[in-house]
Structures are given as structure tokens and as C-alpha cells.
Image (spheres, rainbow, N blue to C red):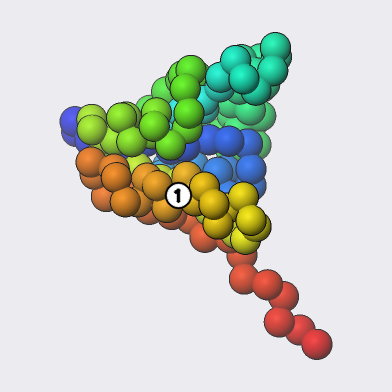
Amino acid sequence: MSDELLIVGMDGSERSHDALRFALEEARLRNATVEVITTWSEDQGVDALEKAQRIQADAKEAVLADHEGDPPVNFRVVEGRPEHVLVDASARATLLVVGAHGVHSIRHAALGSISEYTARLAYCPVVVIPAPAPDQTL
């Protein structure tokens, strides 16, 4: 096993599941380890930690159901804002993989997105798994 570490930001969305799938394939090619990070904070409510743990359990079931342990995958639940936690974690990673939400709202315009934040400030390359293209059928 190499010393390479691929980190995935997991928020429970389908894009974050796609990010984990991408990271697993990339880790196989690189002979690397995958670390999946979900964040929580007290301002998200009294059950925020449990919700983060449930997000990771759901990802294990949805994405890793047939995973045979190669590459190794570690799961971490970390307190803090996701963009800050992921940028900090990127300092020890070879690659950071996050999913895009494809949401264009006033909140997004004012605050930006986690994928944009990490792409600008991460200490390693960042892969953003895009939202699917809108259906173009008429």
C-alpha cells in the first residue's frame, strides 16, 4: 500500500456518494487509502452528531455494500464547518474529492459552495463530481 490518502467529503447527497465511488476507483489505481469525512456542529441541532453518523452508515450501505476491502476505507465524523474541516484535512491528502450540489440560490451566491471553497483553498488537488446535466429532451 502506498502512502497516498484520498479524502472524500460526505454529506449524504447522491453527489457525495458519487464522490466516494470515484475515490474508490482512483484509490485502486493508486494503491491508496480512502478516508470519508462527515462533519457536524452543535448549531445543526441536538441530533447533529447522530445524523452525521447515520449519513456515514447510509454511505457504507449504499456504496460499500459489495466493497471487498481493497482499497482500505476509513470513516471519520468531525465537528466543525465542512469547508474548514476538508481544507484542513487536505493538508495530509493526495487528493480531495467532493460532490457539487448544482444549486444556484441566493444563499449560494452569498456564501459560495463547499466545492468552490475547497477548490480554492485546499492543499492538494480537488476533484469536484458535478451534478448531472439537466434533461435536454423536449
Residue at 48 percent across and 28 percent down: it is 81
Vertical side of 98 occupied by 50: above or below: above
The one of 53 and 66 positioned closer to us in this rendering:
53
Secondary structure of the residue carrying tag 1 is helix
Q: Residue furthest left?
A: 3
Q: Which amino acid type is marked by label 1?
A: Ser
The residue wearing badge 1 is 115
Q: What quarter of the picture does the C terminus occupy?
A: bottom right
Residue at 19 percent across and 31 percent down: it is 3
Vertical side of 124 occupied by 64: above or below: above
Vertical side of 131 occupied by 83: above or below: above
Q: Residue furthest top?
A: 46
Q: What quarter of the picture does the N terminus occupy?
A: top left
Task: Determine whether, in the image, residue 87 is placed left or right of residue 130.
Answer: left
The one of 6 and 24 positioned closer to us in this rendering:
6
Residue 104 image point, x, y percent: 62, 61
Residue 119 image point, x, y percent: 35, 51
Task: Determine whether, in the image, residue 123 is placed left or right of residue 96.
Answer: left
The one of 9 and 71 positioned closer to us in this rendering:
9
Residue at 47 percent across and 45 percent down: it is 114
Vertical side of 123 occupied by 135: above or below: below
